[in-house]
Image (spheres, rainbow, N blue to C red):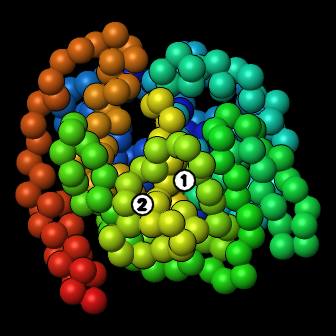
Amino acid sequence: MLKVCHLYPDLLNLYGDRGNVIAFVQRCCWRKIPVELIEVNVGEPVDFNEIDFLFLGGGSDREQNLMAADLLQRKNSLKEAIDKGLVVLAICGGYQMLGQYYLTSDGQKIPGLGILDLYTKAGQQRLIGNVVLEMKIANQSVNVVGFENHSGQTFIGNLDPLGKVLVGHGNNGQDGSEGARYQNVFCSYLHGPLLPKNSKFTDMLIQLALERRGIKTDLIPLENEFEEAAVKVMIDRYLKK
């Protein structure tokens, strides 16, 4: 059985981010893969070593401040689980929190968890709009779509990006990167939510979670024609612009 944890679902659910958990669980269920979903809020216990897939979404500044202190208390156990292969999807504010710090517009440095070697600084304008990425999935180039809305500009240093920006702003609107990847941790600014729009990415995360559980098997193919047709329409529309 795969154990899925949605961390702070009551605070971090910006732009329908909960849909990422729904898509992951549903694509498992369609394949008859048993799944247990755990929702963990501020102050509630969780053993990250028992989790196979962890989702950390985005929220407003107020919500992120409420959960930041709680998350810092979980830093060591989360890092330990990540080093042991925990599969993580972190979106927007959750992405930023995994880094070293967030530098505000007035020069205040807000510490992050320091698990990933990246940092974020406040930008002068919001980076908003639809995004198309080129990313590698199973050694193949795949176009991924989503929606971004963030003022923070993230710089990932020597980390691998999640993908190359074909349309949109990405991490900072400057270097053409979007998101970050470290071991089995995947970070992105893409809302929408991300996974329901991109079935191949979802299946890659499921495969990695199964491998963490010690299960090595090929996933049963699903009928993805509708999702892939919708993505193709959006990609063609954005690239033409």
| Rendering coords of residue 7 (x, y %) | 61, 40
Q: Quadrant of residue 59?
A: bottom right
Q: Is residue 183 above or below residue 124?
A: above
| Rendering coords of residue 137 (x, y %) | 25, 43
Q: Nearer the viewer, residue 176 or 146?
A: 176
Q: Marks 2 and 1: CB-CB under 8 Å?
A: yes
Residue 94 in sight from this viewpoint: no
Q: Nearer the viewer, mark 2 or mark 1?
A: 1
Q: Taking 11 as reference, is 137 left or right?
A: left
Residue drawn 53% across and 43% down? 159
Residue 222 in sight from this viewpoint: yes
Q: Is residue 101 above or below residue 221?
A: below
Residue drawn 51% across and 35% down? 182
> Of the numbered discs in the image, which one, if any, rests on residue 164?
none
Which residue in the protein does label 2 denote?
193
Q: Is residue 134 above or below residue 111?
A: below
Q: Secondary structure at mark 2?
A: loop
Q: Nearer the viewer, residue 222 or 169?
A: 169
Q: CA distance from mark 2 to mark 1?
A: 9 Å
Quarter of the figure that contains the N terminus? top left
Which residue in the protein does label 1 denote?
91
- Mark 1: give few (<14), some (14-19) or many (20+) Cα within 10 Å: many
Q: Taking 63 as reference, is 81 left or right?
A: left
| Rendering coords of residue 237 (x, y %) | 22, 83
Q: Quadrant of residue 114?
A: top right
Under mark 2, the amino acid is Pro
Numbered label tally: 2
